[in-house]
Image (cartoon, rainbow, N blue to C red):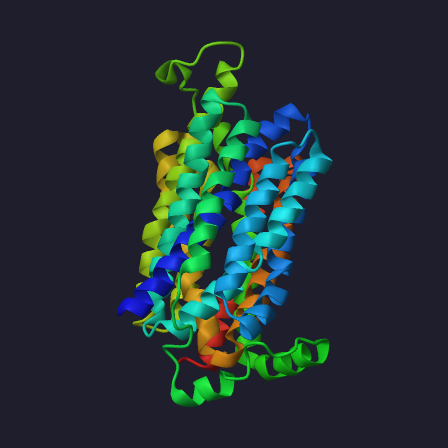
Amino acid sequence: MDGNERSIVGFASAAHALVHTYELSIPVFVVVWLREFGASTAELGLAVTGGYALFGIGALPGGVLADRFGSRRLVAGGLAGMGLSFLALSFANGLVAVALALAGWGVAASVYHPAALSLLSTGVENRGTAFAYHGMAGNAGIALGPLVSALLLVALDWQTVVRLLVVPAVAVAGYALVVEFDEMAAVDADARESNADGPGRAVSPSSVLADSRTLFTAGFVLALAVVMANGLFYRGTLTFLPETLGDFLPPIDELLGVVGSDSVLAAELDTASLVYAGLLTVGIAGQYAGGKLSDRVSPTLGIAGAFGALVAVAVAFVPAARIGPVPLLAVSVLLGLFLFALQPLYQATVATYTPPDGRGLSYGYTYLVSFGVGATGATIAGYLLSTLGMGGTFLVLAVFPALGGGFALALYRWDPA
């Protein structure tokens, strides 16, 4: 990579790590909120779904704004908004307040993915590799956010931990205000010229509709179907995973030296969350493998293979967990590996079927589907856990990767390039 590409990847990666630090710390706090607010998994799943849904729904206007005004300012504003929302969350005293604060976070975070992925796809020549490094940074945040949160919760109340998470948002937002780079360095002269009037153009419903008509080819529609299946499985699996893991893992309060009336709660939270963080850390390898693979073979074939593996993992997860900790750890590693390998693969697929001057809008639709529609996975999982238990929940969730694999194979057969 040259200096411009390194600046782009470094900037996007730092912001990506922070976005997912917030996103995947929420399930750690879910374990505490279930006890503190006396809520059921169905009630809390619904409260969390609002923020996660807005994380996806806001991606579409975020993508439109990215095509018009560029990525840097959007990302800076999003980081500031996420920090303020988590500050508000720290004062929540019930499910309604939690839901409102998470809704604010979802709106602020929603602009990130369409803006950053548009930037990577137009500013870096080897976009599969850029997606890989960007995804690895995101998974570093995904893993470290829950891990740090879980460790802090052993010694501090959850409100204080949430306030501490505001600090890195200030630092990364400050960096976003000063970094400079050429956002269109990797596109040819014709594409640059066609995009020259993009920044600063008036945004209107008619202009978005016209751009969308150009964007929605058959290939792009099938790619969105793949993304939807991934989003439903991703959110449905991860939202209650710390709580699910806690039912199978022994307490380790004697190892932590925790004493007092809350020692069992702290130990269970820490045990489950450490395994959860480990699963997410494995996702770093998955992101790297998926991104590199997308530069070498058809991403749709890689997607089909990863989805097939996830069907097997979902079916085997609870039976393996009931056998003991070692099989549980093994199946968790496989879940983290294949779940996150999908992300750079479908990001590269979307770029293949969309023009450079509509890339922000295309990723807006992508994350509207992935995180917006996908957010209902949290509600689905919460309901299934309260009615079918863990075994039934994972069996039902396995339907989503099965569908996704079918969509990916259909896309490959339609256009194997």
Image position, residue 383 (x, y; %) = 67, 41
Residue 123 found in image quarter: bottom left
For the N terminus, the image quarter is bottom left
Q: Viewer-proximal residue, 172 or 330? A: 172
How many callouts does the rendering have? 0
Left or right of residue 343, residue 373 in this image? right
Left or right of residue 68, residue 188 in this image? left
Residue found 50% across the figure and 87% down from its top: 194
Residue 66 in view of the camera = yes
Name, please, the residue furthest toward the left. Answer: 2
Q: Is residue 190 above or below residue 133?
A: below
Q: Viewer-proximal residue, 60 or 319? A: 60
Residue found 63% across the figure and 66% down from its top: 61
Q: Is residue 206 above or below residue 312?
A: below
Image position, residue 179 (x, y; %) = 40, 61
Residue 315 in view of the camera = no
For the C terminus, the image quarter is bottom left
Name, please, the residue furthest toward the front. Answer: 178
Image position, residue 312 (x, y; %) = 44, 51
Residue 205 found in image quarter: bottom right
Q: Viewer-proximal residue, 82 or 96? A: 82
Residue 254 found in image quarter: top left
Image position, residue 288 (x, y; %) = 32, 58
Name, please, the residue furthest toward the bottom. Answer: 190
